[in-house]
Amino acid sequence: MWKPDRSIKKPIYQQIADFMERRISFGEFPPGSTLPSERKLADYLEVNRSTVVLAYAELRASGIVESAKGSGTRVTKHKWGIAPKQTPNWKTYVEGGTFLPNLPFIRRIREELRKGSGIIDFASGELSDDLFPNEIVRELLQKQPFQEQLGYDDPQGYSPLRETLVSFLEQHLHIHSTDSSILITSGSQQSLYLITQCLLSPGDAVAIEDPSYCYSLPMFQSAGLRLFRLPVDDRGINPEDIVTLHRQHRIRMLFLNPNFQNPTGSVIAPERRIRLLEIASELGIPIVEDDPFTLTALNGDPPPTLKSLDQTGNVLYIGSLSKIAASGLRIGWLIAPQAVVNRLTDARQQMDFGLSRIPQWVANQFIADGHCENQINLLRKGLLKKRNELMRGLQDIMSDYITYTPPKGGLNLWCKINREVDDFKLLDEAIKRGVLFVPGSVYGSDQDCIRISFARPRFEEIIPGLTHLYEALQIHCK
Ligand SMILES: Cc1ncc(COP(=O)(O)O)c(C=O)c1O
């Protein structure tokens, strides 16, 4: 007694095709049998004949029925033809796998940015378009055409780029390396991924900063690591906390972003660095130094990296071009002992056969021809100007709501909101008013903080952005 349902969105012909397919699959029409004529079925279902014609065409297209001249529409004899079409239940698949999804706040921010609505973006921790060396790369590509082969590259990375990096890192960061101790990665993110997947096992205890870089958190959790947090203050983490943690949990690795930490902007104080390295070597704990920001130092010499002070080989160093030149090139590097580089290179071969030679070639020309120094000088001036504008705006517009330490490098400002606030409502209100930021809870346990990236918005957007943010704060702060 089934009849198509005219109140639902699904077209009538599709409902009829599905209905007939079900009857076929339940054996009501066995293979080789003839279906009711189009006219008969149309009368029975009280629809136009043309609707049944469409429904039968749909079944034919799926190979369930066939038309033979003069003998109507028949169920095909092949077994596969009568099997009901089964769409996989993708929901069960996407909920599977070992990769945890990003935090809801991060997904919400990404969706807003994808809309391309012109929202003022204090959320993305990256450079604005005018701070990328677009013009230089364009000219470089015109002057020196790419003439390399396009086969798979060495999974350890394009060797001229590794050689160039050896002198670049020596000159700018006093890091000694050799081309064989460098692995080129698709940004620092891939270095972190390779380390968690290849050097650690589920259940291993690792110590991370609190708060810390938000994209690494689900990655660590997906790898089944047990995370222990080291509180960060204005002088970075306190090394003595590691001793206590190690006693309790046998820490296998320390992940740190010592210079201009994301999100707090803090720099580990000199005496703490020394002590940190001492403790790491006494306890035999490797330190992963995630260092995207050292060369963004706004004034004077950049602080030293742990790697440049490490005398016992405890530090695995991760760097990248993302925050100093171009995140879209996806060029990162990892400096590690030979055994580690070999292991990760081998994994790279299984994972993606190494990075494409094209961005590696571009990066090599860019650094080897001395453009990176110019870029960094311009970048630091540009960032300083924006940081100062942000400070001015915060002072003038919202000093009664927040406290902060002016960052001396990096791309971010970490603000403490002096009142109780619901992150979710605040972000919603800010989006309504055309501005984005990242709520502090994304980075760990701190509830009443927000991260403002001053590198991403254009200079002239900073004050209007802060004004909108202030309006949102006024509504949602108690
Ligand atoms: C501390 C830190 N590490 C790693 C990354 C990843 O950077 P990329 O993969 O672009 O080099 C970021 C990006 O924001 C970061 O802030």
Image (cartoon, rainbow, N blue to C red):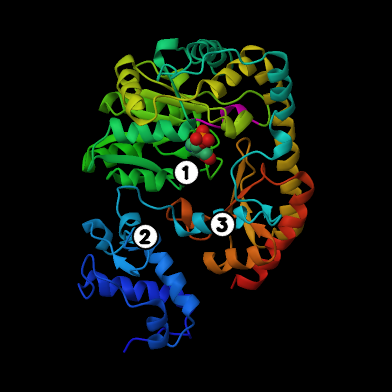
Is residue 162 placed above or below 56 in the rendered structure? Answer: above
Q: Is residue 213 above or below residue 323?
A: below
Q: Is residue 132 above or below residue 211?
A: above
How far from the left and from the top, in percent, is residue 408? 63, 36
Most foreground residue, 438 or 287: 438
Percent of width and height locating residue 86: 30, 61
User: Of the residues under marks 2 and 3, which one precedes in the sequence?
Assistant: 2
Mark 2 against mark 3, which lies toward the viewer?
2
- Comparing 462 with 45, the one in front is 45
- Quarter that holds the N terminus: bottom left
Label 2: which secondary element: loop
Q: Nearer the viewer, residue 151 or 79?
A: 79
**Label 1: how many residues lie within 10 Å, few (<14), some (14-19) or many (20+)?**
some
Q: Nearer the viewer, mark 3 or mark 1?
A: 3
Q: Which mark is residue 62?
A: 2
In magenta segment, residue 131: no
Q: Is mark 1 within 8 Å of ligand 1?
A: yes
The residue under label 3 is which amino acid type? Answer: Glu
Q: What mark, if any, has residue 213 been given in the picture?
A: 1
Q: Report whether 411 appears left or right of 174.
A: right
Nearer to us in this view, 343 or 319? 343
Residue located beneath label 3 in the image: 111
Q: Residue at x 48, y 33 (%)?
A: 258
Q: Which residues are magenta?
A: 291-297
- Find residue 181 and report its horizontal and vertical position in percent: 40, 14
The answer to whether 340 appears left or right of 324 in the picture is left
Crowd class of label 2 (few under 14; some 14 to 19; many from 20; radius 10 Å): some
Query: In the figure, is residue 271 to the left or right of 393?
Result: left
